[in-house]
Image (cartoon, rainbow, N blue to C red):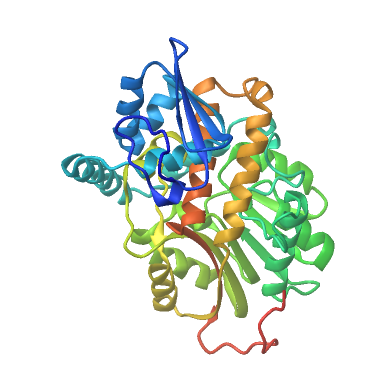
Amino acid sequence: MSPGTQTPDGVAPHPGLAGWAWKAIFHDGSEQTSGAGRPAFTLHIASPQALQRLLASDAYTAAVSFLRGEFEVTGDLAAAIRLQSIQLQPRFNRLLSALHARIALLLDATRHSRALTRQQISFHYDRSNDFYRLFLDPGMVYSCAYFHAPNDTLESAQSAKLDLICRKLDLQPGDRLLDIGCGWGALLDHAASRYGAIATGCTLSREQYRFAAARLASKATVLDCDYRDLSGSFDKIASIGMFEHVGRRHGLPYFRKIAELLAPEGLYLHHSIARAEGTGDDPASHFVRRQIFPGNRLTHLHQMIQAAEIAGFETLDVENLRPHYAITCRHWEQRLSARRDDALRYVDMETYRAWRLWLAGSAIAFEDGTNAVYQLLLARRGAQRRRLTRVQV
């Protein structure tokens, strides 16, 4: 903030907030403004005292207050989250909040039964498919898009991502493709229609299964089953945004199962969010597990690669799509925000607020580098490869 900026009492200036303004409007009609120019967002909150309590809160407490409607945000929700996140809390409060989040993860991390996994998947994905249609592209792709330019449409970027996966896998007509956690079937459709693959996918979401099975009735096979119960041999395997439900403690058995399913000269495309080194569970991740993704377990890049190599894989290529996911999350949050009334036909207000908060917060995490999303191309160690060079974008 520049010198002379009017700042609400107790709100510390921060260099990351330079160049934009924000406003608070209180219930008595009075206002406070920070920064010069048009506000990026406006907080509607009871009083200056309530504002200070909000800014001093940890991320989980602030998020729950938002879900309960104790304050409202108009304008850029991600900017409001960024403002709250950079406020300094007392050291004891920070340590206590982080400890609580990590204990909660430790209690959850050891549990990975088939029944619990299905229950956790259902919590997130088995909302109305019409709810997801409000903010996803027409192909219903629910993972990081691939933007050749920042102003590409979400639709074109998602199609480009599906094509990138197929080209990295060197997909050929007649190849047996397995998509683990196939969602609503977009990759299966793309691989079968454009590359002539014999495509099979599995999901634990009943809503996704019904949608994908109807969508792909004559193109691909969709299974309602846990990946641990799959059998057979596949030339190419993809897992797009599914490993987040597995986590570090169960990573080695996961990669061993992939190795068991993969043909000797096959390729595996592993697409997963990972945390930056030095970061761990905190109140924000605790909120995500409680409200959005129960069982969500983010790992670090080296942990994924280590588990894969112990399972007998060789790492052929690694690509970080972090900026692409930041743009994707911005698209999703803006689309959902614009369809508020439609969304409330399918979910309650707290769920709607939770999804907006999660998408906006995710955009920040990818913009700032706290989270990244990697595509790893893997093969059995020593396998012969038809293509000697990296896929050209």
Tell me where residue 7 appears, x and y as whole percent. Answer: 38, 34
Q: In which quarter of the image is the N terminus?
A: top left
Query: Is 38 located above or below residue 201 in the figure?
Result: above
- What is the count of numbered marks? 0
**206 with respect to 151 (left or right):** left
Q: Is residue 119 visible?
A: no
Query: Is 23 located above or below residue 155 in the figure?
Result: above
**12 with respect to 33 (left or right):** left
Observer-nearest of 248 and 113:
248
Tell me where residue 237 appears, x and y as whole percent. Answer: 62, 67
Query: Is 244 located above or below residue 206 in the figure?
Result: below
Q: From this viewpoint, which residue is outermost toward the top?
A: 28
Tell me where residue 190 appears, x and y as whole percent. Answer: 77, 59
Which residue is found at the position 39% from the left and 52% from the top? 297
Residue 375 image-quadrant placement: bottom right
Q: From this viewpoint, which residue is outermost toward the front?
A: 4
Q: From this viewpoint, which residue is outermost toward the left?
A: 92
Observer-nearest of 111 and 77:
77
Observer-nearest of 324 and 91:
91
Which residue is found at the position 67% from the left and 89% from the top? 388
Q: Quadrant of the C terminus?
A: bottom right
Tell me where residue 338 appears, x and y as whole percent. Answer: 68, 30
Residue 98 image-quadrant placement: top left
Q: Can residue 13 be seen in this view?
A: yes
Observer-nearest of 190 and 114:
190
